[in-house]
């Protein structure tokens, strides 16, 4: 068996295990997206209540951990670059 088939149990595929997939991009990629006030509590516990309809930009690690919250897309981009992360946008 090749190394790939030993890890996945699949002959001739390049499939990732769940553990490998969970760590894909870790420490390298961060995603940023606009987030509404109603979503903030789930991603950023302890954040004060914001006015309904407020939109902010959030930066998340590849594994979904929140990194920072800002009022401008440029701030999220700068945060990624300052942490040597490759930013990607999610819509």
Image (cartoon, rainbow, N blue to C red):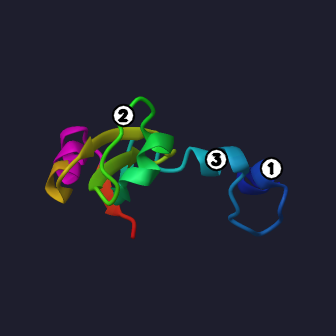
Q: Where is residue 42 shown, x and y percent of the image?
A: 51, 43
Q: Where is residue 84 shown, x and y percent of the image?
A: 25, 42
**Residue underneath mark 3:** 20
**Residue underneath mark 2:** 47
Q: Is residue 85 left or right of residue 29?
A: left
Q: Give the extent of the magenta segment.
A: 76-85
Measured Cα–Cα span from mark 1 to mark 3:
13 Å
Q: Is residue 49 left or right of residue 41?
A: left
Residue 31, placed above or below residue 89: above
Measured Cα–Cα span from mark 2 to mark 1:
45 Å
Instruction: Answer few, some or many: residues within 10 Å of disc 1's Cα (few below 14, many 20 plus, some between 14 and 19).
Output: few
Q: Where is residue 7 shown, x and y percent of the image?
A: 76, 49
Provide the secondary structure element on which disc 2 rests: loop
Mark in the foreground, 1 or 3: 3
**Quarter where residue 23 is shown:** top right
Q: Nearer the viewer, residue 1 or 32?
A: 32
Q: Nearer the viewer, residue 82 or 52?
A: 52
Provide the secondary structure element on which disc 3 rests: helix
Dot 1 or dot 3: first in sequence order is: 1
Q: Nearer the viewer, residue 83 or 15?
A: 83
Measured Cα–Cα span from mark 2 to mark 3:
32 Å
Residue 6 tag number: 1
Mark in the foreground, 2 or 1: 2
Q: Main secondary structure of the magenta part?
A: helix
Q: Where is residue 8 shown, x and y percent of the image?
A: 78, 54
Instruction: Answer few, some or many: residues within 10 Å of disc 3's Cα (few below 14, many 20 plus, some between 14 and 19).
Output: few
Residue reaching furthest to the top: 46
């Amino acid at each position: 068996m090749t190394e790939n088939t030993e890890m996945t149990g699949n002959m001739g595929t390049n499939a990732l295990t769940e553990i490998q997939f969970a760590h894909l991009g870790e420490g390298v990629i961060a995603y940023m997206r606009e987030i509404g006030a109603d979503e903030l509590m789930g991603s950023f516990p302890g954040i004060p209540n914001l006015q309904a309809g407020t939109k902010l930009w959030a930066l998340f690690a590849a594994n979904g951990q929140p990194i920072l919250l800002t009022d401008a897309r440029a701030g999220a981009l700068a945060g990624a670059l300052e942490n040597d992360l490759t930013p990607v946008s999610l819509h």
